[in-house]
Amino acid sequence: MGFAVATKAALLLHLSLFVLSSFTVSSQILPEALPPHYHGISPPKIAPVYPPPKSPSKPPTYAPPPKSPSKPPTYAPPPKSPSKPPTYAPPPKPPTKPPTYAPPPKPPVYPPTKPPTAPPTKPPVHPPTYPPPSPSPAKPPTYPKPQRSLVAVQGVVFCKSCKYAGSNTLLGAKPILGATVKLTCKNTKYKQEATAKTDKNGYFFLQAPKTVTSFGAHKCTVSLVSSPMAKCSKPSNLHGGLKGATLRPEKPFTANKLPFILYTVGPFAFEPKCY
């Protein structure tokens, strides 16, 4: 605040000096009033007037800047006294004897109340129910009795090729003409037999005795008996030709107005003598 007041006073002083000096210079520069000029008469010469030299102006004075306020001395805070740990009072000891309470009041006793009795109700009357009539026992289906038929057997007999002798194959085999086969049935008290011979194609067809029917055909077998060829006369067991082959049913047929069932066996083969 003091520095600002001093600065303003110095500026006002400097401004007043500047205005005063400007008025002085202007009065010196203006010429004095000249006398009237007359024609034909030369006026007297006046020596030039020079203004007096200016006095050196004093430099403005400024007030010294205010001193900055001195900082107050700082003091270290006094050392804190060591804080003592808080002391706690020991917890109160629990009472040794448990508290006693008065017994709860007994609930009031009321006399038992009888439930309301409803008047007896009669059960609803339903009409009598009768069990449904038992169904009549189902009759087992009836099938027509199988027809008893006579037995006929067919087959073919070959002679094996020397290339495949001893093997169960008919590759390269040729049919035998006049080979004998036999049908044997054991469905009666006495054994029933029948024989037949092959044609040029090795085919044979024979009929069993009339005492043998389709009901007992499962007890019949067909086997090889002999061959007319000396070089091919050893029966082989191909398809049971040696031990006896069982009959395979093929189809029913009628001959001389008699029913037959045709069975098939084989094909059979004889082993060749290759040397």
Image: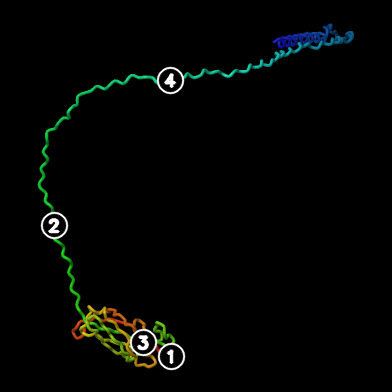
Which colouring convention does the figure follow? rainbow
Q: Is mark 4 on a helix, strand or loop?
A: loop
Q: Which of marks 2 and 1 is in front?
A: 1
Q: Tell me what residue is drawn at x 83 percent, y 9 percent.
A: 28
Rounded to the nearest angstrom, the CA distance separating label 2 from label 4 is 89 Å
- Amino acid at dot 1: Cys
Q: In front here: 98 or 232?
A: 98
Rounded to the nearest angstrom, the CA distance separating label 2 from label 1 is 80 Å
Label 2, on which residue? 134
- Amino acid at dot 2: Ser
Q: Position of residue 229 (x, y in %)?
A: 36, 93
Viewport quadrant of the N terminus = top right
Label 1, on which residue? 274
**Are the two marked residues, 2 and 3, in contact with CB atoms closer than 8 angstroms?**
no
Measured along the vertical axis of the image, is residue 269 above or below residue 64?
below
Q: Nearer the viewer, mark 2 or mark 3?
A: 3
- Sooner in the amino-acid sequence: mark 2 or mark 4: 4
Residue 190, picture quadrant = bottom left
Label 3, on which residue? 235
**Are the two marked residues, 3 and 4, in contact with CB atoms closer than 8 angstroms?**
no
- Amino acid at dot 3: Pro
Q: What numbered label is drawn on residue 96?
A: 4
Residue 184 shows in the view? yes
Q: Position of residue 32 (x, y in %)?
A: 83, 7
Viewport quadrant of the C terminus = bottom left
Q: Position of residue 75 (x, y in %)?
A: 69, 15
Residue 209, picture quadrant = bottom left
Q: Tell me what residue is drawn at x 14 percent, y 58 percent.
A: 135
- Sooner in the amino-acid sequence: mark 2 or mark 1: 2
Residue 41 shows in the view? no
Q: Tell me what residue is drawn at x 37 percent, y 85 percent.
A: 236
Rounded to the nearest angstrom, the CA distance separating label 1 from label 3 is 15 Å
